[in-house]
Amino acid sequence: MIVKIKDDKSYIEDVCLNDITDSYTTPIYIYSQKIISDTYKHLKLHLSSEIFYSIKANSNQAILTLIKNLGAGADVVSAGELQRAISAGFNPDKIIFEGVGKSKNDIEYAIDKNIRLINAESLNEILLIDEIGKSLHKKVNIGVRLNPNIDGKTLEKISTGKKTDKFGIGIEKLPEIISLANTLNYIELKGISCHIGSQINDLNIFKKVFKTMKKAAEKTISSGINLEHLDLGGGFSVNYEEDLNSLDIKSIGDLIKSIFRDVKYKISFEPGRYLVAKAGILITKILTTKKNGNINFLVVDVPIIFPPNL
């Protein structure tokens, strides 16, 4: 978010921060509705795909309501996030439940809320969902997160698409997944998905992911599965410094049009950070100043540990 200085006062979108701090006690998080809205519309325009906001990026209830009103769905990774999405008014048919470590209670709750898909991340989880569906006398729509073994060329701690990462089922096991899905009575395989990491800015990596997942979709359909959804993840990089080049979303949209021409299933993405990373600031007050050695310190009213720009 850009803060402008005018007459020695700080402004955000023509609102003076002094007026805010006069009314509210610091520390305060402030988010820009305009930035979030403009970023979402930019994605929607160029990707021409369904957008599911990854709630883990920022689960502030007002932000969830805003993004829901813009037309997005929700991507959740816990029962708590699912509760927040429902409280914000997301239609259950526009909610997808991801996550490696779903408990039996989590899955039962998601089934009870009739969400669009529960994305399984292991063969054991597929079996568990089928078992729960049987106990509830209900067939459950699932997706499967595949691990395409593609390096996003990002930081190791935010890599999620290599075969050594904990996320998803190895894409080489797709025939086994399909065979299992065809033998179980209480799950319906409706989608496949992937997500290879965050802060990806190389267009060639996205191209590789898209082509790999299209082949996986073709194999799934040719096996007789009625595939309805292909989720290509997120990971769009955010530059926190204004002088750096941003990821070209239009070019990603052009890739989608060329690679997925005339497919019958729906394409979706699950951005999180990209939608909200530049939309917020923290306002804090200086309590006192001090000097230790040759270093000057400002003591503020909130303890902050600044992480590296991930």
Image (tube, rainbow, N blue to C red):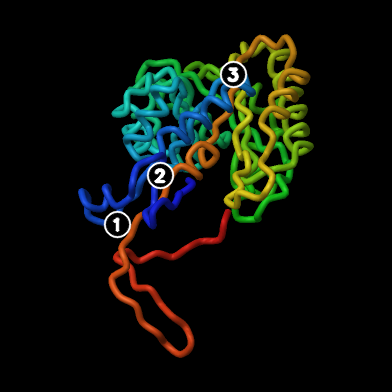
- Residue 191 in view (yes/no): yes
Q: Nearer the viewer, mark 2 or mark 1?
A: 2
- In the image, what residue occupies the spot 51% across and 38% down? 272
Three-letter amino acid code at the position of disc 3: His
Q: Label 1, on which residue? A: 27
Q: Earlier in the sequence, mark 3 or mark 2?
A: 2
Tag 3 secondary structure: strand
How far is disc 3 from disc 1 in space, using C-alphas?
A: 42 Å
Q: Quadrant of residue 175?
A: top right
Task: Pick out the residue farthest to the front.
Answer: 7
Tag 1 secondary structure: loop
Q: Earlier in the sequence, mark 3 or mark 1?
A: 1
- In the image, what residue occupies the spot 35% across and 55% down? 283
Residue contact at pointers 3 and 2, CB within 8 angstroms: no
Three-letter amino acid code at the position of disc 1: Pro
Q: Earlier in the sequence, mark 2 or mark 1?
A: 2
- In the image, what residue occupies the spot 49% across and 39% down? 99
Q: Compared to 56, does 108 lie above or below?
A: above
Q: Is residue 233 left or right of residue 261?
A: left
How far is disc 2 from disc 1 in space, using C-alphas?
A: 16 Å
Q: Is residue 75 left or right of residue 256?
A: left
How far across and how far down the image is residue 266, in percent?
A: 60, 15
Q: Label 3, on which residue? A: 229
Q: Quadrant of residue 296?
A: bottom left
Q: Label 2, on which residue? A: 12
